[in-house]
Image (cartoon, rainbow, N blue to C red):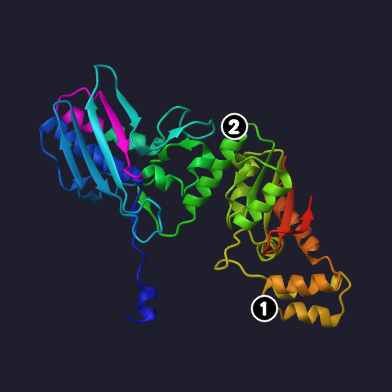
């Protein structure tokens, strides 16, 4: 198949852990009420779509039934792709309503600031509502009260959670059951930005007055060495500096630091708020103009203009004794403050080289 044909193919969507858990609950509760497991099981998503899910696990006893569904994240590189989401539904006493429990591999919330209370299973509000609606509809159809315990488990989920932000957010013991639409859009920025928001929420609830966002592991290590911030105050910002600063506009903390490599911070200085290489580029003419403004001659400016990488441009300037990284940091600070739009947030910028050494700072 040719490259052009591949490019024209649409990336395949997938289903959230919340959608899979809801389908598993519907299958298990149906079996508890009727003795039969629907396979495939169809659910209605918040947007009205009605996907069908094949069962990978069935089991039942006198007062319980369980069903499992293998999560298909489509073409998204989701850490939970291929994981089994298991729902065990048990009858509860009259008036108990629907109670959620964390089974093996599902985390428990241990810090305030998340949309679920401390001590509760890490099952987010929309998936909870979807499961409640399934239970209510089936209970009404079969003359039942709908008083049940729902235990969600993800075998192997604790190991998978170590690859997510859950430990940093104070979610212990496993994964979160997530999703607001039920649909995973491949390579969507939405999930990452939502996690940035939750990180800020947790940091604010913990009373931190200084948080920091880094573009990668090298700049995060530099932040830790520089400020000795606790892990919970370090936001895994990645390329989404705009997503972080925009959220801080409405949910301020007294001080925030943004750290990154010279190329990433240069793009921020030039006004880009998404620093991914596919969505913003370094303007070498802009860098050459800054070198000239710092006193570099025409030859120096031309060297910077013709540099292959931003770091090469910075190396040229540094060799000439020109503080280009400091200039870039100050311009990035100005761009970030413009994004904050007067919010009561002090912003500083840290620029690091590939070894993690600080080469520029503003604020």
Q: Residue at x 47, y 28 (%)?
A: 117
Residues in magenta, as a range? 135-156
- The answer to whether 50 appears left or right of 199 in the picture is left
Q: How far across and down, in percent of the image, does residue 44 sit? A: 27, 44
Q: Is residue 46 something that shows in the picture?
A: no
- On residue 99, the disc is none
- On residue 205, the disc is 2
The answer to if 174 sits in the magenta stretch is no
Provide the secondary structure element on which disc 2 rests. helix
Quadrant in which residue 332 is drawn: bottom right
| Residue nearer the viewer, 167 or 181 | 167
Q: Would you name the residue on which mark 1 appears?
A: 308
Q: How far across and down, in percent of the image, does residue 75 sit? A: 36, 61
* 348 up-or-down from 142: above or below: below
Q: Residue furthest left?
A: 35
- The quarter of the picture where the N terminus appears is bottom left
Q: Residue at x 22, y 32 (%)?
A: 137
**Number of other residues with Cα within 10 Å of mark 1, as a class: few under 14, some 14 to 19, many 20 or more:** few
Provide the secondary structure element on which disc 1 rests. loop
């Amino acid at each position: 198949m040719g490259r052009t044909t591949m490019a024209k193919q649409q990336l395949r969507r997938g289903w959230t852990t919340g959608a899979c858990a809801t389908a598993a609950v519907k299958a298990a509760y149906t079996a508890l009420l009727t003795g039969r497991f629907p396979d495939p099981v169809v659910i209605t998503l918040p947007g009205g779509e009605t996907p069908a899910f094949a069962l990978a696990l069935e089991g039942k006893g006198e007062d319980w039934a369980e069903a499992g569904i293998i999560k298909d994240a489509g073409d998204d590189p989701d850490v939970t792709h291929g994981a089994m989401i298991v729902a065990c539904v048990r009858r509860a006493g009259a008036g108990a309503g629907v109670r959620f429990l964390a089974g093996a591999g599902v985390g428990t919330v241990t810090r305030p600031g998340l949309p679920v209370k401390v001590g509760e299973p890490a099952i987010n509000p929309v998936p909870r509502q979807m499961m409640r609606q399934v239970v209510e509809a089936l209970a009404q159809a079969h003359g039942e009260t709908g008083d049940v315990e729902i235990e969600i488990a993800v075998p192997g989920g604790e190991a998978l959670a170590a690859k997510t932000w859950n430990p940093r957010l104070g979610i212990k013991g496993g994964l979160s059951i997530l999703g607001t639409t039920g649909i995973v859009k491949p390579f969507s920025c939405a999930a990452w930005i939502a996690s940035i928001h939750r990180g800020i929420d947790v940091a604010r609830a913990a009373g931190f007055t200084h948080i920091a966002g880094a573009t990668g592991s090298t700049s995060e290590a530099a932040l830790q060495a520089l400020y000795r911030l606790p892990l919970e105050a370090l936001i895994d910002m990645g390329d989404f500096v705009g997503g972080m600063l925009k959220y801080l506009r409405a949910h301020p903390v007294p001080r925030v630091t943004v750290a990154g490599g010279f190329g990433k911070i240069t793009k921020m200085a030039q006004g880009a708020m998404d620093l991914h290489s596919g969505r913003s580029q370094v303007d070498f003419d802009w860098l050459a103009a800054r070198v000239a403004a710092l006193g570099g001659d025409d030859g120096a400016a031309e060297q910077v203009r013709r540099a292959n990488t931003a770091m090469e441009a910075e190396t040229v300037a540094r060799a000439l004794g020109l503080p280009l990284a400091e200039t870039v940091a100050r311009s990035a600070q100005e761009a970030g403050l413009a994004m904050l739009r007067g919010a009561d947030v002090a912003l500083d910028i840290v620029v690091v080289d590939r070894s993690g050494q600080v080469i520029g700072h503003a604020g």
